[in-house]
Amino acid sequence: MEVGETHDTCLKRECIEEIGYDIEFIKHICSANGYVYLNDLGYYQMIQHYYFVKLKEFIKPTIDKDHHFIMAPYRDRKMKIPMQDWAIHYFLEMKDNI
């Protein structure tokens, strides 16, 4: 987050930068806090926030030219961090209540 940003304004900015799309912020789903091992840093405390959003229009190409946005079914997941799987399961269990 940049100085003065809220979670939803940061999320909108990051989505445009990282995937090229504007989003509609729907709801904060959950947060997770855990330790992960990163080769460069060793054990690292990671705090993540998960949101339900809707993709809107394409705004511009991403900052990183070697990144390509794709939608993939969760069954084809490649989550490296266990708390990400937990957050997806949490969302899938509660999505009908949003």
Image (spheres, helix red, strand yellow):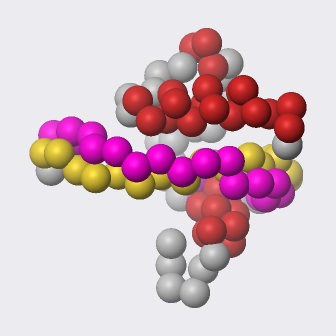
Task: Determine the residue located farthest toward the top in the rendered image.
Answer: 75
Relative to 39, residue 9 above or below:
below
Q: Is residue 86 magenta?
A: no
Is 84 in front, or is 41? 84
Q: Is residue 62 visible?
A: no
Residue at 40% x, 49% y: name it: 33
Q: Position of residue 23 (x, y in %)?
A: 78, 56
Residue sitting at 34 percent across and 45 percent down?
34
Where 54 sits versus 95, above or below? below
- Please tell me which residue lies in front, 14 or 67: 14
Q: Residue at x 69, y 34 (%)?
A: 91
Q: Residue 90 falls in which quadrant of the image?
A: top right
Please identify the dominant SS of the magenta region. Answer: strand
Residue stretch in magenta: 16-39
Q: What percent of the width, then of the height, locates residue 70?
A: 65, 31
Query: Who is closer to the viewer here, 95 or 42?
Result: 95
With respect to residue 55, does 63 lie above or below? Answer: below
Q: Is residue 36 magenta?
A: yes
Counting every numbered tag in the picture gives 0
Expressed as whole percent of the image width and height from the top left, the position of residue 10 reads 61, 69
Q: Does residue 23 appear left or right of residue 1 in this picture? A: right
Q: Position of residue 44 (x, y in %)?
A: 23, 50
Q: Looking at the image, can residue 34 be seen? A: yes
Q: Which residue does the image show at 85% across and 43% down from the upper left?
A: 98
